[in-house]
Image: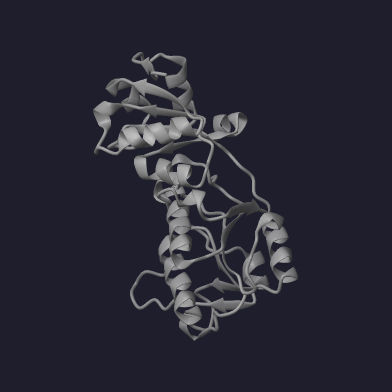
Amino acid sequence: MPAEKITSLQNPRVKELVRLRDRRPRDEAGVFLVEGYREIRRALEKRVALRELYFSPDWFLGENEPALLAQAEAAGAKLFELSKEAFAKVAYRERPDGLLAVAPQWQRRLEDLVLPAAPFLLVVEAIEKPGNLGTILRSADAAGCQAVIVCDPVTDIFNPNVVRASTGVLFSVPCVVDESARVLAWLKQRGIRTVATSPAAEKLYTAADLRGPLAVVMGSEQYGLSKFWLENADLPVRIPMAGQADSLNVAMATIITLFEAVRQRG
């Protein structure tokens, strides 16, 4: 069946897509936006049941888009073609590629995680910037973490910029959102050590034993880890700082720590 064509900027579907940029309408509807060829392809690869897919050939960057549209439609997504102007209104990227999907939100619990004997996890607390959270998810995937646990979130994992910065890895890395106290109790019950970065720690991260069951714990951009995690972490470590800056971007600090663990565990 040919896709319904939408040209008016006042169309109710166009207005709804613009509303879904904000968290409250997303949560109320139980959906979120997925923009971009790579992100939508990864969602389909993980069998995410896309509800709708909006496209505009005027913005296409390559020749693979028709095949992706056919794949999405075969999987149950309803297709809508937008005019160039209508797509520009709903897109949140500065340079869109003409593809925007609506996907259902999901909830995963700690108890749902299936872990190996020596799990390698990433725990992040109160991350504020969607771009940082997305980059952290992408880094966790590259490092081979079995899951990312988001504690006391300030930004939600379904923020469009989280999806974008993760390059769609949100669909492949198991991600759980929960409270810090519950997460710590769950980790301790399973004998998973926690390593926390702090400028006040005596031991360098390269001198710590990061093998075995492990959860790397990282804090917010502005305040770092809370007192709760610093006091309860099994292994506080620090990343040496030789210049005038007294801290690193949280995504960069996460990458440094994760890949030291990868080196040791390899």
As drawn, 231 above or below 73: below
The mark tally for this picture is 0
Which one is in front, 199 or 16? 16
- Looking at the image, the residue that sits furthest to the bottom is 207
- Relative height, residue 152 to residue 73 (above, below): below
Residue 184: x, y in percent? 69, 65
Q: Quadrant of residue 117?
A: bottom right
> Above or below — where is 38 with respect to 263?
above
Task: Determine the residue positioned at 53% across, 72% down.
Answer: 198
Q: Is residue 11 above or below residue 265?
A: above
In percent of width and height, residue 58 lies at 25, 27
Residue in the picture at 49% in, 86% down:
207
- Tell me which colouring the rendered structure shows: one colour
2 and 91: which one is in front? 2
Quadrant in which residue 79 is drawn: top left
State the image coordinates of residue 63 (x, y, percent, origin top left).
Answer: 25, 37
**69 or 160: nearer the eye?**
69
**Residue that appears at 42% across and 21% down:** 14
Question: Which is nearer the eye, 54 or 72?
Answer: 72
Q: Is residue 247 visible?
A: no
- Horizontal side of 213 relative to 167 (left or right) equals right
**Relative image position of residue 153 (x, y in whole percent):** 58, 50
The quadrant the N terminus occupies is top left
Q: Is residue 103 visible?
A: yes
- Seen in the image, is 195 located left or right of residue 249? right
